[in-house]
Image (tube, rainbow, N blue to C red):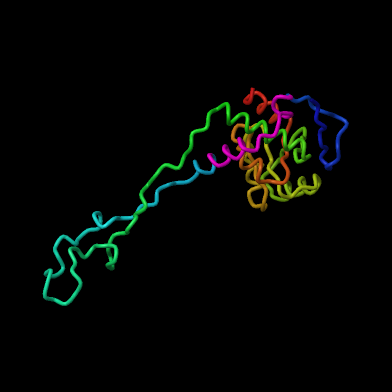
Amino acid sequence: MELKLTTATGKASTKSVEVSDDAFACDYNEPLIHQVVTAYLSGARAGTVAQKTRAQVSGGGAKPWRQKGTGRARAGTSRGPLWRSGGVTFAATPRDYSQKVNKKMYRKAIKSILSELVRQERLLIVDDFKVTEPKTKAVFDKLNALGVSNVLIVAATPDDALFLSARNIPYVEVSDSADVDPVSLIRHEKVVMTVAAIRQIEERLS
């Protein structure tokens, strides 16, 4: 299939680019996308939270007072959950939240997302998106010309000047084609991709 290129002023160009139907014209698979996005977000969780049970809290080895005759409730340790400085009843322990997703499933989900972006006209393809020096205004002016504000910019290769120029603009994210992820593609209203980035993504998804 052919997709129209977008000029620097945000208008449709007379040029077009040929893209793979397999990557940009497949069916929308919402359950698969949900599964992949959930797995991606779960994998980003640290899972390092830790609390101590009554067995792990230091102290409490001796019985606080004798069993009978004091008038107080019987107690075997001063580190029970009801006591100050005691252990936690259902203590959280470090755990791994990652979920297994097959490579074929991940690639299929990315294809489905890209195809839906094309159908919703949320994908803008440009010849190039570069800045000569790291200046926020340079990227800001380019985005204003394209008429986008909440956008993901996907370039073919990492460009330090582009990353530095866009990092202070709210709702603007820059990624290279090798690191593009399903959450970023869904999160933004528009996705701006260079022709070179599309070629690399097609190769990776083939």
- Asked whether residue 23 is drawn in magenta, I would say yes
Main secondary-structure element of the magenta-colored stretch: helix
Residue at point 76%, 41% (across, down): 122
Q: Can you give x and y, in whole percent of width and height, for residue 64 in the image?
A: 16, 68
Residue at 73% across, 47% down: 138
4 left or right of 79 in image: right
* Residue 141 percent location from the top left of the image: 77, 48
Q: Nearer the viewer, residue 172 or 96?
A: 96
Residue in view at x 88 percent, y 31 percent: 14
Identify which residue, 191 or 128, lies in the foreground: 191
Is 113 a magenta residue? no
Could you tell whether 89 is left or right of 109 in the image? left
When the figure is inspected, residue 63 is found, relative to residue 106, above or below; the finding is below
Range of magenta residues: 21-39
**Where 181 sits versus 102, above or below?**
below
**Which of these two is toward me, 142 or 37?**
37
Q: Assign the N terminus to one quadrant of the image.
A: top right
How far across and down, in percent of the image, does residue 143 sit? Answer: 76, 46
